[in-house]
């Protein structure tokens, strides 16, 4: 079990909030007064979704789904499990998928394929707080992201280690595993 003292701060809370505000401005310019469905991928992106939604000025609806590609420990299994993926009718809607991190890309690809197979949306965009391009295994990239990161195991601000540390207001990495 890691402890908070095992963490090195990578992105302080103030930096995270500044980047989220900038992203909110971009999204407001894209969607203007159009209705938007935001899909929060639980559990990791809950903090990011809530804070980003505070900056969005268009009419929006929030939906929540639960996918998983992590077992216990530090690495993705590479296999995506759809724990709860009940969605309303997204036909002819603008959809924004919100993720905490894209690393291998399997979860992002699974979700984009699922929505594209089941709905004919007006638009679909993918936003991630963190983009770990160095770990990408499939050809998918977020339309928007706040931070590009290297290969570190991160916790805090929604990201967890075995369910712990989601409530830390900053993003830290484990100094030694």
Image (tube, rainbow, N blue to C red):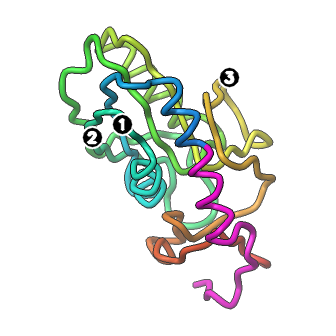
Q: Is residue 55 above or below residue 165?
A: above
Find disc 1 in the rendering and name its residue. 38
The residue to which callout 3 is attached is: 139
Q: Residue at x 38, y 52 (%)?
A: 42
Q: Which residue is mark 2?
A: 63
Residue 139 location (% of width, % of height): 68, 22
| Spot occupied by residue 175 in the image (x, y as percentages of width and height) | 78, 78
Residue 53 or 141: which is nearer the viewer? 53
Structural distance between the alpha carbons of marks 2 and 3: 26 Å
Which dot, 1 or 3, sits closer to the camera? 1
Which one is earlier in the sequence, the residue at label 1 or at label 3?
1
- Residue 154 as seen in the image, left or right of residue 24: right
In the rendered image, the vertical position of residue 31 relative to residue 49, given as above or below: above
Q: Nearer the viewer, mark 2 or mark 3?
A: 2
Is 10 colored magenta in this rendering?
Answer: yes
**Closest to the observer, 41 or 76:** 41
* Element carrying mark 1: strand
Q: Quadrant of residue 136?
A: top right
Between disc 2 and disc 3, whose residue precedes? 2
- Magenta range is 1-22
């Amino acid at each position: 079990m890691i402890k908070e003292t095992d963490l090195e701060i990578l992105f302080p809370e103030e930096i995270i909030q500044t980047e989220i505000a900038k992203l909110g401005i971009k999204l407001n310019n894209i969607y203007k007064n159009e209705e938007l469905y935001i899909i929060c991928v639980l559990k990791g992106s809950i903090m990011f979704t809530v804070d980003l939604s505070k900056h969005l000025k268009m009419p929006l609806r929030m939906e929540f789904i639960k996918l998983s590609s992590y077992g216990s420990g530090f690495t993705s299994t590479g296999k995506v499990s759809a724990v709860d993926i009940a969605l309303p009718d997204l036909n002819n809607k603008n959809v924004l998928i919100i993720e905490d991190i894209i690393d291998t890309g399997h979860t992002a690809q699974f979700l984009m394929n699922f929505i594209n197979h089941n709905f004919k949306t007006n638009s679909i965009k993918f936003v991630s707080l963190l983009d770990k391009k160095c770990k990408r295994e499939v050809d998918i990239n977020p339309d928007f992201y706040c931070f590009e990161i290297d290969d570190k195991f991160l916790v805090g601000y929604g990201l967890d280690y075995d369910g712990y540390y989601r409530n830390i207001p900053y993003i830290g990495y484990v100094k030694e595993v």
